[in-house]
Amino acid sequence: MSIPFGSLAELLEGVEATKKRLEIIESVANFINTLATEELSAAVNMMVGRAFPKYSQKTLDVSWSTLIAVMGRISGGEWNRLFGEAMSKTGDIGTATKQVLEQTKTKRQLQLTQTQLTILEVHRALETIAQTKGKSSRIKKERLVTALISQATPLEAKYLIKIFTSEMRTGLQEGLMEQAVAQAFHVYLLRVQHVAMMVGDIGEVAEKLRTEGIEALEKAGFSVFRPVKLMLAQTSNSVQEALTEQGAGLAFEYKYDGARVQIHKQDGKVCIFSRRLSDVTESLPEVVAVAKQNIDAESAIIEGEVISLDSAGYPIAFQHLMRRFKRIRDIDSIANKIPLTLILFDILYLNGESLINKPYLRRRQILQETAGNIPLSQQIVTDQPRHAQAFLQEALAAGHEGLMAKKLDSPYTPGRRGKRWLKIKTILEPLDLVISAAEYGYGRRKDWLSDYYLSARDQASGEFLDIGKTFKGLTDAEMIDLTWRLKEIAIQETGHKVTVLPKIVVEVAYNEIQQSPKYKSQMALRFARITRIRDDKAPEDASTVGLVREIYERQFHNKGKYTNN
C-alpha cells in the first residue's frame, strides 16, 4: 500500500520547523527508507518542491488565478478575505492556505478527507494535469485540481499548493536531499552527487539504488535528449585577481552577451535546451540545422552560446534575442529580423563516453575536432596579466560582457558553482534578482506596475528576501508587458502594492551595497536599476543573499568601512 501523502506533509512540516541540517538529513533518510520503490522518485521530487524531475519537459501549467478559483470554491467563497489576512501574518502561501482551510472546514470536506490521499495518487493526479492540453484545458485542469485538493487535509493542501507553485521553502534543498539519499542507502555522498549530476534527478538516483544497489552508480551515465544542469562560474574582479586565484595559466574566453544553450545530437536528430533546461528546438531551426550539418558525432552533448549580431557585427540587446526563444510560430519572419549565430565552448559527452572528468584543455581539443565549421569561443591561454587585459578590452570593444577564465585542468561539474571557472566583468557585478512585489506608478504610469521590489535567495531556507526597490531601467513597453505578467502571478493586493509569486528574474545594476535594518536580508542596493529581464533564468538561479553580502565586503578593498561601534 502506498504511503499516505499526509506522512510526507508531516515530514516537511517537521523539516520546516528545524534549522538543524543533521536532523533534517536523518529524518528525510528515515522517511526514504519507508517508501516503496514505485513511489520513491515521485516522493523525493515532491519533497524538494517539484512535480516532476528537473530535466522533465512536463509542466503543470496551472496558473495562480486557477488556484484562486479552486480554493475559493473549496473554502466556500471566503477565500480572498481570509487568504489576504493569513498572508499578511505568515508571508507564506502554503501556510496561509492551510490556515484558511482550517477556518472553513465543511461537512463535505470532512467526508472527503476520510479517504486518505496517497503519494502515488498525488503523483498520478499531477501527471494527468500535466497531460491535459488543448481546447478547454484550463477548465479541465481546474476540475482536476479541485478534485485533488478537495480530498486533502489542510496540512496536505499546504504542500500541494507549494508543489503547484514551486514554492516549497522548507529548507530541504537539493544538496541536503543528496545527503539524505546517501545516508539512506549507505553510499558515499560524492558518488551520489556525481551520478545525480549526470542523471539529472536525485529521485532517479534513489530509485536506482533501491532496485539495482550500489552497482547502479557505476553504470549510470548521460542520456542524450535529457538535459544536464549547467556548470556555473564564480565572479572575479579582474584578470589579475583571476590569475592570482588560480595560480597558473588560464584559458581566457569571451563572455558573450547571448543565451546559453545545450545541444544534444543522436543518430541525426538534434534537440536544443535553454539555460532553464527547456526544449527550445522549435524556436531555433537555424541552430538545429547548423548542428546537424557540422557536429561530427553519432551522439554528443555540447554547450554553446547563441548570439544575434547586427549588420555591423555587434550583439543586439538581450531582450530582443529572448524573443527568439519564446517564438514557435512565424519563425521565418522573426529569423530575418533576429538572425542567430551559434558559438561552442564545451563538450560533455561524445559517442557513448562521458568527458566531464577530462581536463578542460582536452575537452576543448575534442570539441575542436567535433565542431566542424561551427566557431568556438574566442580564446587565449596565458599567465601574463597584460595579455589577458588586452584580450578583455578586445571583448568589450566587440560589444561582449567580459571574459571567462577557466583552469586548464578543470573537470566539468554540472549544476555546481566553483572557482575553476571565473567570470570577469569591468563594472560592479550585476545581480540576478526576483521581483517579489510591485507598486502602481503615478502620472502616466498610474495603470502600470512599475515600482519593483527586488529579492535575493536565501540559500538555507529558499526564501526570497528583499534587498531593494526600483522603478528605473525598463522601457514603457517592457513595463506594460511586465504588468500583465505580474498580475497573472499576483497573490495579494494591498493598496497600491501587489505581492507576487517570485517567478520573474531581472538583472539589476547598482552603485553600491549598504547595510540596512529596513530589510530582513540586512542589505540594501543603492541606486538600483533593472538592466534586463532574464527569462532565461529560473528563480533558483537568482543571486543569493550570501553573494550580496560577499560583494558588500568586497567594496571595502579600496575604501574605508564605517562601523557603528
Image (cartoon, helix red, strand yellow):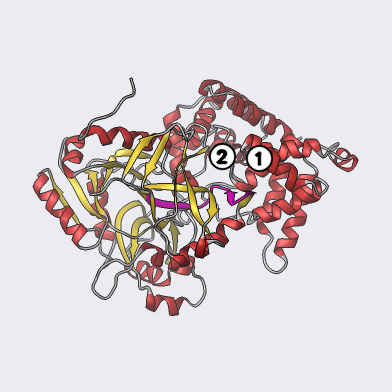
Residue type at tag 1: Met
Q: Residue at the location (50% across, 36% down)?
A: 174
Q: Position of residue 11 (x, y in %)?
A: 65, 28
Decide: marks 1, 2 in contact (CB < 8 A)?
no
Dominant secondary structure of the residues highlighted in magenta in the image: strand
Camera-nearest residue between 128 and 267: 128
Q: Position of residue 203 (x, y in %)?
A: 56, 39
**Label 2, on which residue?**
203
Camera-nearest residue between 304 and 257: 257
* Residue 501 belongs to magenta span: yes
**Label 1, on which residue?**
87
Camera-nearest residue between 323 and 135: 323
Number of numbered callouts drawn: 2
Separation of marks 1 and 2 at Cα, in angstroms = 32 Å
Residue type at tag 2: Gly
For mark 1, does the 10 Å Cα neighbourhood hold few (<14), some (14 to 19), or many (20 or more) residues?
many
- Visible in this render: residue 3? no
Q: Secondary structure at mark 2?
A: helix
In the depicted structure, whether residue 461 falls above or below residue 470: above
Dot 1 or dot 2: first in sequence order is 1
In the depicted structure, whether residue 342 falls above or below residue 450: below
Magenta extent: 492-508
Q: Residue at the location (57% across, 38% down)?
A: 48
User: Which quadrant of the structure image shows residue 111?
Assistant: top right
Q: Secondary structure at mark 1?
A: helix
User: Which quadrant of the structure image shows residue 204?
Assistant: top right
For mark 2, does the 10 Å Cα neighbourhood hold few (<14), some (14 to 19), or many (20 or more) residues?
many
Camera-nearest residue between 417 and 58: 417
Q: Residue at the location (80% across, 45% down)?
A: 75
- Visible in this render: residue 50? yes
